[in-house]
Image: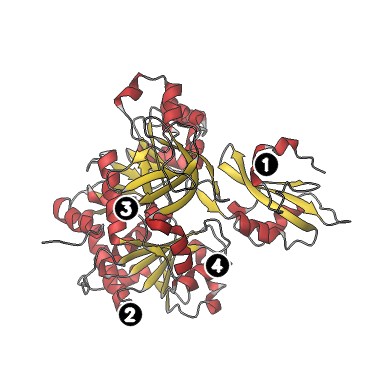
Amino acid sequence: METPLSPLEFARRARKLYPDREAVVDGDRRYTYRQFLDRCERASSAFQTLGVVKGDRVALISPNTHTNLETYYSIPQFGGVIVPINYRLTADDFVYLINHSGSKIVCAHPDYFDAIDSIRTQLPNVEHYIAFEGSHDGWLAYETLVEQASPDFHRTEVAETDLLSVNYTSGTTSRPKGVMITHRNAWMNSVGVLVHMHMTPSDRYLWTLPMFHANGWTFIWTVTAVGATHVCLRKVEPLAIYDHINREAVSLLCAAPTVLIGIANGPEAQRRAVRPGVRVITAGAPPAPATIERVEGELGWTITQAYGLTETSPFITICEPLPAHDELSAEQRALIKARQGVELVTSGETAVFDDQDQPVPADGTTLGEIVARGNTVMRGYYNDPEASAKALKGGWFRTGDAAVVHPDGYIEIRDRLKDVIISGGENISSIEVEGTLLRHPAIIEVAVVGMPHEKWGESPEAFVVLRSGHSLADGELKTFCRASLAHFKVPTSFHVVAELPKTATGKIQKFVLRGKRAAIATQ
């Protein structure tokens, strides 16, 4: 009597129990669950007509629209694999991700038609290009495909261990890695969220989080599981957020710290007029306690921090509130809410290990690496067995994050073992940025590190050593980087230094640059 654990089961249940409830709001478009899931089934039929079969990959490049949302159901429900791509990347990045994933079809929003058209000759395996909205020369129109498709698609048996998505993450290397997420992984994360967040059919969820981010932290399917409403938001700006919250009676949203900062510091009149009682899940980087205090104190919202990685579907801990926390001051509660928390009921085991793979004492001071094993950990990296073996060594997923365990069992990140920079919820590879800067003829050495940033949580900053006899014009390096990198990867500042701090073996000591920026003599 066993049935596969898949988030697509939530769609079957929603169609049965909530057919007339509002499922999706996207501007003027509103769909009930019956209408939304009928569109998904027609889309499944259309993709099959185009030759997509079980195991084929389909790349998605789009902001948060109803058409994008539909593909997270239509493609996997017959065994296809979605490849959500960060639309903020460059055309060259698109080439690598589409080719590495072996995507057979590319679906894109009109904002990215030109970028894709410029690289089509470099995508030999792509058979069709689908325009999520409108029409475009050389592209198939999604709406036309859905309207003309049969509602009866060929149902292929899907196992819970089958791939559901390949989600790319830069990590600490210059080449992104494709995280293989199974149906079981996504189901477990969704159910874990429901256990800890207590969602109901009356909830209205605002899409402030990009759907490409670890499948929208699986809220793609979690919202549907309880018959709640998806409220699409195409551009994340404070005024748009306030407007949607008030107009659509939003009760829940997810936000990286940069979005929280924007919400907390938007225009005062509009900020104070926004409806209270909104629940917020934040992840991606630890939010500042001051931001938490402001959002909860001024707006009357409730913030819960979760922690995880794309490789863990994504959540492995959540800062679950305890009754004892109610007795604390707002400042003390904010300090606790800034911690990463404890295991989710469904995520499996999370620990902090020392360099001997032994748990560190729960003293709040001893550093170790966060490791995890359980039902939300990825199958591995797509077409990268070496990286998979390294990440899953000894039966544990190694996060690369350094943390302590407090006496109450709550985990708190203190630093990152990796040199990844998390800016506005986006992972930035310092190696990639350094490689770009080293192509500049005036630079002989460079180190890029993450520094605290008021808006983005942290941002990349570059420390460069110039070749003898060379100089730089104001803004020269920023212009140089923008020609090759996505804008969010470009350092916010550049410091010219006489030398970089190094160990006796010549390794650059990035922790010195992070902690002692003011002490480094600049030229």
Image marks 1 and 4: residues in contact by CB distance under 8 Å: no
Q: Mark 3 — residue?
A: 374
438, above or below 45, in the image? above
Horizontal side, residue 122 vs residue 341: left or right: right
What colour scheme was applied to this rendering of the protein?
A: secondary structure
Q: Amino acid at mark 4?
A: Ala
- Between the C-alphas of marks 4 and 2, the distance is 25 Å
Q: Amino acid at mark 3?
A: Gly
Q: Position of residue 188 (x, y in %)?
A: 28, 52
Nearer-the-camera pick, 447 or 210: 447
Q: Mark 4 — residue?
A: 115
Q: Mark 1 — residue?
A: 512
Helix, strand or loop at mark 2: loop
Q: Amino acid at mark 1?
A: Val
Nearer-the-camera pick, 409 or 480: 409
- Between the C-alphas of marks 1 and 4, the distance is 39 Å
Task: Give the mark nearer the N terminus: 3 vs 1.
Answer: 3
**Neighbour class for label 1 at 10 Å: few (<14), some, many (≥20)?**
some
